[in-house]
């Protein structure tokens, strides 16, 4: 069975939507950040601090290459910066059906205010940084994806339902009457 891949900016809800998709569609869930942390034996912040962003990006490419060789049928949420490399965008499409969870800067700012786990948002002016990064990344996320799913002001259940319909998954979720 094909993998379902969730991409998008930090705070788009890739992990929570991914876990909900996995449980609704009876698939396994995997997060590339967690995969890298396990393989490297180091937290993301530590990898950025001691090895730098480029080394982390290389680990992301390696992770996708590893996952292509493994079994399918998973929901895979992908670190926000992984689709930036052209090579990774091509690899992601080989890995499965790619959904871009599209989020506004305002939603990201509300969700990630005070977060200390994202090294790229730790500077002086995180709001400005979110705007800049998102503007740069938006066209790349679009290029990487088979489908775009808007996640602003929507419940996880609603988003899962849309992904299920796009992916042709049978829903096992209790629906409201
Ligand atoms: C990053 C996103 C993070 C993590 C790292 C870099 C990015 O993952 O991979 O901090 O460049 O957008 P999430 O998107 O899961 O927060």
Image: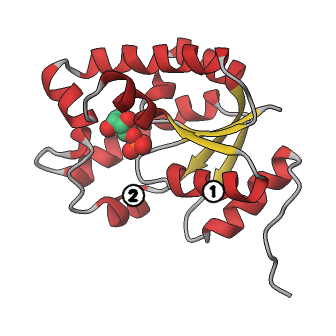
Residue in view at x 47 percent, y 16 percent:
61
- Counting residues from the N terminus, which is met first, the one under dot 2 or under dot 1? 2
Residue 89 vs 32, above or below: the answer is above
Residue 11 vs 3, above or below: the answer is below
Q: Which residue is mark 1?
A: 150
Q: CA distance from mark 2 to mark 1?
A: 13 Å
Quick one: quadrant of the N terminus? top right
Residue 124: image tag: none
- Tell me, yes or no, whether the two marked residues, 2 and 1, touch with CB atoms within 8 Å: no
Residue in view at x 74 percent, y 28 percent:
72
What is the secondary structure assignment of the residue under circle 1? Answer: strand
Decide if residue 150 is on the left or right side of residue 8: right
Q: Dot 2 surroundings within 10 Å: few (below 14), some, or many (20 or more)?
A: many
Does the beta carbon at disc 1 come under 8 Å from ligand 1?
A: no
Decide if residue 30 is on the left or right side of residue 40: right
Which corner quadrant of the image does residue 36 belong to? Answer: top left
Comparing 58 with 112, the one in front is 58
Query: Residue farthest to the bottom?
Result: 177
Decide if residue 154 is on the left or right side of residue 82: right
Q: How far across and how far down the image is residue 13, in percent?
A: 50, 55
Picture quarter with ligand 1: top left
Does the beta carbon at disc 2 come under 8 Å from ligand 1?
A: no
Q: How far across and how far down the image is residue 46, in percent?
A: 18, 31
- The colour scheme is secondary structure
Q: Which residue is mark 2?
A: 108
């Amino acid at each position: 069975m094909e993998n379902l891949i969730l991409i998008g900016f930090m705070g788009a809800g890739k992990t929570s939507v991914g876990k909900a998709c996995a449980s609704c569609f009876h698939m396994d869930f995997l997060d590339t950040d967690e995969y890298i942390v396990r393989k490297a034996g180091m937290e993301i912040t530590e990898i950025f601090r001691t090895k730098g962003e480029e080394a982390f990006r290389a680990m992301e490419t390696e992770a996708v290459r590893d996952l292509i060789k493994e079994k399918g049928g998973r929901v895979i949420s992908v670190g926000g910066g992984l689709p930036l490399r052209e090579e990774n965008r091509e690899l992601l499409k080989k890995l499965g059906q790619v959904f871009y969870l599209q989020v506004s800067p305002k939603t990201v700012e509300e969700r990630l205010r005070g977060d200390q786990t994202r090294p790229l948002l730790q500077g002086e002016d995180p709001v400005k940084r979110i705007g800049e990064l998102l503007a740069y990344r938006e066209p790349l996320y679009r290029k990487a994806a088979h489908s775009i799913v808007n996640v602003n002001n929507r419940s996880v259940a609603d988003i899962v339902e849309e992904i299920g319909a796009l992916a042709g998954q049978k829903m096992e979720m209790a629906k409201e009457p």
